Amino acid sequence: MKNLIYLSFGVVLAGAAACTSYAKTISTYEITPKQTEIANKRWSESNEAKLKHGKSIFTVQCTECHKAFVIEKFSEKKWNHEIDDMSPKAKLTAEEKQDLTYFVLSYLEMKQPAK
């Protein structure tokens, strides 16, 4: 019985640690004026509302089945592939897919070192 209590306590602590790390990752994805400017230069139809919508998709719908990936750990080519591959599975509309792409790629460009 004592072992079961220790095991349960360990599982709770591990879960809490994982949630803290996850929340920290998600909270870093704030829409900034710089990101909005980058998006506007790349896609004339983008705006802050579309970036916020894309962020919402990334942090809510994309994480229903898996963790939120660190955006800057993957290339633009890889993100385009993943978004193309996963959008049908997530049942995203064309507009949702577009807003997700705007958010992810503008965030990625903002975080990449200047060339």
Image (tube, rainbow, N blue to C red):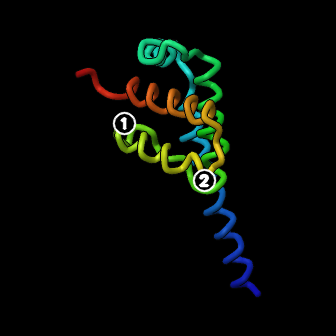
What mark, if any, has residue 55 been given in the picture? none
The image shows residue 106, relative to residue 27, as above or below, that is above
The image shows residue 94, relative to residue 31, as above or below, that is below
Nearest the eye: 90 or 60: 90
Q: Is label 2 in a helix, a strand or a loop?
A: helix
What residue appears at the point 67 percent right and 42 percent down from the top-left corner? 60
What mark, if any, has residue 76 been given in the picture? 1
What residue appears at the point 56 percent right and 22 percent down from the top-left corner? 31
Between circles 2 and 1, the one closer to the viewer is 2
Q: Position of residue 41 (x, y in %)?
A: 42, 12
Residue at far right of view:
1
Residue type indicated by callout 1: Glu
**Residue 9 appears in which quarter of the rendering?**
bottom right
Residue at far front of view:
94
The image shows residue 48, relative to residue 64, as above or below, that is above
What residue appears at the point 63 percent right and 49 percent down from the top-left corner? 90
Q: Position of residue 112 (x, y in %)?
A: 33, 28
Q: Is label 1 in a helix, a strand or a loop?
A: helix
Nearest the eye: 5 or 11: 11
Residue type indicated by callout 2: Lys
Q: Position of residue 28 (x, y in %)?
A: 54, 32
Q: Which residue is mark 2?
A: 89
Binning the other alpha carbons within 10 Å of mark 1 as few (below 14), some (14 to 19) or many (20 upward) gives some
Cα–Cα span, label 2 and label 1: 20 Å
**Residue 55 appears in which quarter of the rendering?**
top right
Nearest the eye: 19 or 104: 104
Which image quadrant: the C terminus?
top left
For this view, does 100 lie left or right of residue 15? left
Which image quadrant: the N terminus?
bottom right
